[in-house]
Amino acid sequence: MAVVRAPANPILTPQDAAPSPDGFEVIGVFNPAVARYRDEVVLLVRVAERPIQTDPEVVQTAFLDPVRGRIVTMAFARSDPANDFSDPRLIVRQGRTYLTSISHLRVARSRDGIHFTVDARPALAAADTCESFGVEDPRITRIGETFYISYVAVSPVGVTTALASTADFVTFERRGILFGPENKDVVLFPEAVGGRHYALHRPHSPLCHTNDMWIAESPDLLCWGRHRHLMGLRDGFWDETRIGAGAPPVRVDEGWLEVYHGADRNHRYCLGAVLLDAREPWKVRARSARPIFEPQAEYERAGFFGQVVFTCGLLLERRTLKVYYGAADTTVCYAEIPLDDVLASVRS
Ligand code: MAN
């Protein structure tokens, strides 16, 4: 696999985005969605921030109080055995889960696809009860002149996926929740197939410990049904504990190519590829046995959550996958992978 990482990687870091409220620090700029808009490449990046940590004995976090409509902070003592900090992304206390940061989505623009300027203000930030812990991991799908954004909304009522849209990346319209808890990694197909819209999604079953990919269909992009199980985990493989759609699928001669992420039991996140039938996209035609992209560079192996490459968007241009991805839940990076290498890997 002839993966070429941009020499400029990481192309965006936490230093490139100003914190949204005073007294906060940005700890991650990662997992971007991508679209071409006019003569620019536009990213919608996930910006993770938290209150500036002033006391080493205390973990301070923040979330939206949806009743008062403002961000509030909360402190957790490191010495309190009731606080579980074993996953750096979470604090678990007395059966409740909190996040160590709150994320919003921000626009970044570039002429050359490598050098980006990040907007000063969020495009989409926590706005209601279902988003009170933040909004994460957007995917952009252009359908006609509208850019649809499926994004993850996190709150004490669970992890859901919601839809927003924009025509210009200046104003954004919220369109409501598509998939209830626990569901993330929702990507919309860029065109209807047989007159129906399709979405890949990733429900979680706490009973069966599954994190599999499903496919659903819709007449209007809002009401989703006819769910079908698409593909599951593979014991002993790189994608043995969780999988989820990455970038929205792209149409190639052989069908729909989906670049997805998978994690193993050590929480190492790689990218793989799967080919879905062109007319019956609920049928898996081929799936790569090995990852097409693995965390290898230093900025992918170490960071806020190391050993992670995670994509939410790519551009297919001149038979090249131009992959924008989050590295170690900290930065935005870019790599090019020849489409023919990916297709060969999927078929083998
Ligand atoms: C989660 C995802 C991403 C994140 C990875 C790795 O499952 O939703 O937000 O990049 O884990 O931490």
Image (cartoon, rainbow, N blue to C red):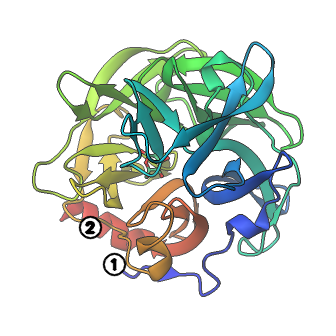
Can see residue 244?
yes
Foreground of the two, 29 or 97: 97
Where does the image place residue 125, in percent across and percent down from the top left? 75, 35
| Badge 1 residue CB within 8 Å of ligand 1 | no
Q: Could you tell me how many numbered marks the image carries?
A: 2
Residue under the point 67% across and 37% down:
62
Q: Is 181 placed above or below 212 here?
A: above
Check disc 1 and give the amino acid type: Met
Q: Quadrant of the N terminus?
A: bottom left
Q: Are marks 1 and 2 in contact (CB under 8 Å)?
A: yes
Residue under the point 80% across and 16% down:
68
Secondary element type, mark 2: helix
Q: Residue furthest left?
A: 236
Residue 345 image label? 2
Q: Is 44 placed above or below 7 here?
A: above
Judge left or right: residue 124 versus residue 78: right
Q: For residue 118, which quarter of the picture?
A: bottom right
Structural crowding at the residue carrying mark 1, measured as other residues with C-alpha within 10 Å and reported as few (<14), some (14–19) or many (≥20): some
Where does the image place residue 235, in percent across and percent down from the top left? 10, 49
Where does the image place residue 299, in percent across and percent down from the top left? 50, 76
Where does the image place residue 16, in percent across and percent down from the top left? 77, 67
Judge left or right: residue 116 versus residue 80: right
Q: Residue furthest bottom?
A: 7
Residue designated by label 1: 1
Foreground of the two, 333 or 98: 98
Check disc 2 and give the amino acid type: Ser
Residue under the point 60% across and 87% down:
7
Secondary element type, mark 1: loop
Structural crowding at the residue carrying mark 2, measured as other residues with C-alpha within 10 Å and reported as few (<14), some (14–19) or many (≥20): many
Foreground of the two, 275 or 216: 216
